[in-house]
Structures are given as structure tokens and as C-alpha cells.
Amino acid sequence: MASKISVVVISRNEGEELRRTVENFDDTLPAGGEIVVIDDGSSDGSASRVTKRRGRIRLHRVQDFGVARARNFGAGQARGDVIVYADAHLRLERDWWRPMVEALENPKVGGVAPGIVGYRGGRIGYGLKFTDPRLEVRWLRRKPRGPAAAPIIPGCCFATRRDVIAATGGWDDSQLQRGNIDNEGSVRFWLLGYELLITPDTVVAHKFRKQSPYKVGWPEFLFNRLRLAFVHFNPHRLGKTVAALRNYSGFGEALALLAASDIAQRRAELDARRVRNDNWYCKRFNMIW
């Protein structure tokens, strides 16, 4: 296990959860690891509590970057060759990182995530998949016998290598606020030729909340879904997604945001680089719609 691990924790108004999560990482990471905390404009004072422990915890404050841009910024500040993107509300057992780092030794593997369970227990999720043209997702509940491919792996604890970040561009900086960030990244990694795996014998507890600690607007939320579809889907599948979302509140504003973005350039850039298409992806994971 020669890899140096950098955990990039993205936080905004997480209260005591941030401190507990960061200290949990500090207690469980191997020697040489580090924790890079990106506080994206918190107003609750939570970021000031994470620096009480010295050593391998570093804090950077930014303002309204959104999840994707904050993750990319954090990776740029990190020193490790393995980057773990993490939510600020996790609980981890000792050696949680070991199977994930082992899986990343395969150069074909671009990302790895553990099984995810709620703080209060319940059913474990082993990755996710799209359910319909609205790009809604559901958890995969059947436990694989070993490391297994998943169409979407959760960004709440997503490990990758620095060379993969360079090859894929990391997360899409143009995605707004939060929501659907992991979905777009997972689709893109697959289409660029990488595999995404779940390591089922590692389970990380995640705090599932009914409400975000900060406001997320519907236009921005829909923009992220539409951007995924416009960048990665063929015209037929794209049309289905647009038709499925068009009656949602904020759709018109989302479409205007999309028109003002770099969507055409982004599509052309990835068309030139992808080695798989969306038909391959949907057939591979039996997502027929």
C-alpha cells in the first residue's frame, strides 16, 4: 500500500458533522494520508472547528463554488496520488480505504466506492442506476460477491487516482450547486473507457437528510440533469429526457442557463474522446428507456 491518500471533504453548513467526519478520517487513514477540507461559504462557523487538530488536516475556504468545482479545487490542493472525495457527514471503520486502494491498482479502474448505509442502519446500497428518462436513480441492493461494476458510484465516498482526474477532467465545473454531480461524472468515466467498481465488503455510513442545509434552486437542479443529457445522450434518448422534465417548475430557466453555457463545446470535446456511447452504457447496465 504505497499510495498516499488525500481525502477531499466538501462542506457547507454541516455543523458538528464536519468536525466528527474529519476526525473520523484522521483516526482511520494510514500514515502519510491527509484531509483537505473545502468549506464552500458556510455561515454556521463549522469550518473553524476542524483545525483544532493539527497535523494532516488542512482547511481552504471558498465561496459558492458548488460541489463539482469545490471537488476539483480540493483535488488541486491535495498531494496524494489517490484522491477520495467525501461528504462531510460520514462514519468510517478502520481500514475502510484498503479494498478501494487495491482496486485502483488496476489501471482500467477509474473510480471505486464502498457500500453505503444510513447512520441508523438499514439496507446497504451498492451503487446506483438510472430508472427512467427523468434521470431519477435508485440504489442497487443486491450485494456482489466481490468488487463489481456499477453504472453510478456514490460521490459521498468516491476514490480515484490522480492520473484518472487528469485524463477525465475530474468533475464538470459547469454543474451548479449540488445534485446529479456524481451521476454525470460516473457516465463520463464509463464513456471515456474506465470502469467504476463497488467494493462490497467495505461499508461506510452516510447521513441521509430530507432537506439540504442550504437552498438548492430547481432551475439549477434541472440544469444539471439537462446538461448530463445534452452532453452524453444521443438525440433519441435526449429527447425522452427533455420531454420527461419539461413540466417541472424551473424547466424554462434551466433551459436558458443551458443555452448560455458551453454545452456545444463540451459535447464536441467529449464526442472526440469517448470510446463508448450511451447505447453501450444503458445496455451494459440494463437501463432500457
Image: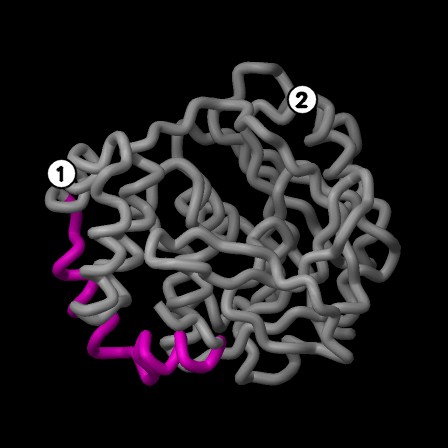
Mark 1 lies on residue = 256
Dominant secondary-structure state across the stretch colored magenta: helix
Left/right of residue 238 with respect to residue 115 in the rendered view: left
The residue lying toward the viewer, choosing from 72 and 209, is 209
Find numbered disc 2 in the image and state the secondary structure of the residue it sits on: loop
Q: Residue at x 51, y 53 (%)?
A: 75
Q: Residues within 10 Å of mark 1 (few under 14, many from 20)?
A: few
Count the numbered circles shown: 2
Q: Residues within 10 Å of mark 2 (few under 14, many from 20)?
A: some
Q: Residue at x 57, y 66 (%)?
A: 160
| Residue 125 position (above or below residue 23) | below
Q: Are marks 2 and 1 in contact (CB under 8 Å)?
A: no
Between marks 2 and 1 in the image, the one whose residue lies nearer the viewer: 1
Q: Magenta part of the protein: which range?
A: 261-285
Find numbered disc 1 in the image and state the secondary structure of the residue it sits on: helix
Q: Is residue 39 visible?
A: yes
Q: Amino acid at mark 1?
A: Ala
Q: Position of residue 288 (x, y in %)?
A: 39, 72
Q: Residue at x 27, y 30 (%)?
A: 249
Q: Amino acid at mark 2?
A: Gly
Q: Position of residue 186 (x, y in %)?
A: 46, 64
The residue lying toward the viewer, choosing from 9 and 203, is 203
| Residue 50 position (above or below residue 286) | above
| Residue 134 position (above or below residue 16) | below
Left/right of residue 64 with respect to residue 110 in the rendered view: left
| Picture disc at residue 15 | 2
Q: Residue at x 55, y 24 (%)?
A: 213
Q: Position of residue 211 (x, y in %)?
A: 55, 26
* Residue 281 inside the magenta-drawn segment: yes
Toward the top, the furthest residue is 44
Q: CA distance from mark 2 to mark 1?
A: 35 Å
The residue lying toward the viewer, choosing from 22 and 141, is 141
